[in-house]
Image (cartoon, rainbow, N blue to C red):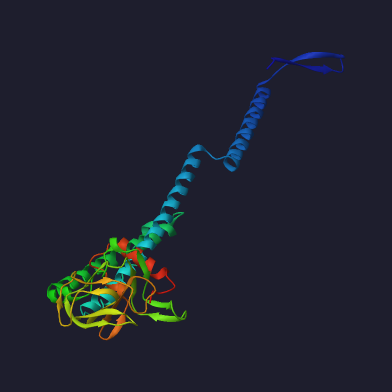
Amino acid sequence: MARYRYRYNPSRLVYEKVPYTFKDYAGWALKVVAFVAVVALVSIFTFDHFFESPKLLDAQRENRFLREQVNDLNQELNQMAVVLDNIAERDDEIYRNIFGAEPYPEHLRKPGIGGADRYQEYEGYENSELIIEAQKRVSELERQLVSQSKSFEELFEIAKSKAEMLASIPAIQPVRNEDLKRVASGYGWRIDPIYKVRKMHWGMDFTAPTGTEIFATGDGVVVRVERKQSGYGKNVIIKHGFGYETLYGHMSQIKVKNGQKVKRGEVIGLIGNTGKSVGPHLHYEVIKDGQKVNPAYFYFNDLSPEQYEAMLEQSNAANQSFD
């Protein structure tokens, strides 16, 4: 800034040099400081409201990623809960029923958990609700898994004392997987292939080439051998004891005789197309205490979970039976 300024003197009609005073310099300094402060405040406001810092952007990206991960975790936990519920259902309705045991108590299968402040440490955050929900699902599944493990331990102790029963239960497929063309029809309402009306199909139809071996699915005694031109054609019934019987229909050959004792896995006949049948297959039934039940519940001895699910899918897909 110049050291002097000029001011017009009207009495002398001339411009005179007037030096700047300290007050003038102080005023200029205050104006500059005020201008810089205003520019700084406007800049800070603008960047805070209209621009995001790299650190903030990184934090937001990380939050989105973690939120997605928690959402995925909750979905996986829900799927695990469905699988565990299915295991519990099979435990009560199949395994325990087979051994004559009472269903595992519900209050033990799904025990409660105390403590209202159990999840207090997760509260107060942007994604608290998601995290608390995931923690609750994990805790619930942990309790159910422990309970299911105890139920299986109890069943194992029962099973050890019932070796004869285990050998007698019809626990395998009557036809080897590698011999099957497909599971043509399962247990349930199906279209009759001859009369074209909906009828209850009381067993499962396994299609395979004529002459394929058929196996006894549990230890027992042959109590019926029939060679008919209608109905189940050439068929066999095995009595396994403990309330169980199995029927094998539409054979081309019967390899056992009435009163004969058989072991699980022993060949009892060959697949055929005899009786009321529209193609080579085995019609297989399981009877428990005089009532026909779904044979699919009893393939726990020789099928993996994946094979079991595939078999159910095939048997349920068919809308028409083979007999």
- The image position of residue 247, as x and y in percent, is 27, 79
- The image position of residue 293, as x and y in percent, is 31, 79
- The image position of residue 94, as x and y in percent, is 27, 75
Q: Is residue 34 above or below residue 293?
A: above
| Left or right of 201 on screen, residue 176 | left
Comparing 37 with 88, the one in front is 88
Q: Is residue 214 above or below residue 10?
A: below
Comparing 120 with 258, the one in front is 258
Q: Which of the 4 quarters of the picture holds residue 12?
A: top right
Q: Which of the 4 quarters of the picture holds residue 190?
A: bottom left
Q: How many marks?
A: 0
Comparing 122 with 269, the one in front is 269
Q: Which of the 4 quarters of the picture holds residue 218?
A: bottom left
Q: Can the viewer see residue 198?
A: yes
Q: Residue furthest bottom?
A: 290
| Quadrant of the drawing holding the C terminus | bottom left
- At 45% from the left and 52% from the top, the residue drawn is 68
| Left or right of 144 on screen, residue 241 | left
Q: Can the viewer see residue 110?
A: no
Comparing 165 with 223, the one in front is 223
| Left or right of 186 on screen, residue 28 | right
Q: Is residue 65 above or below residue 134?
A: above
Q: Is residue 87 above or below residue 232?
A: above
Q: Residue furthest front?
A: 229
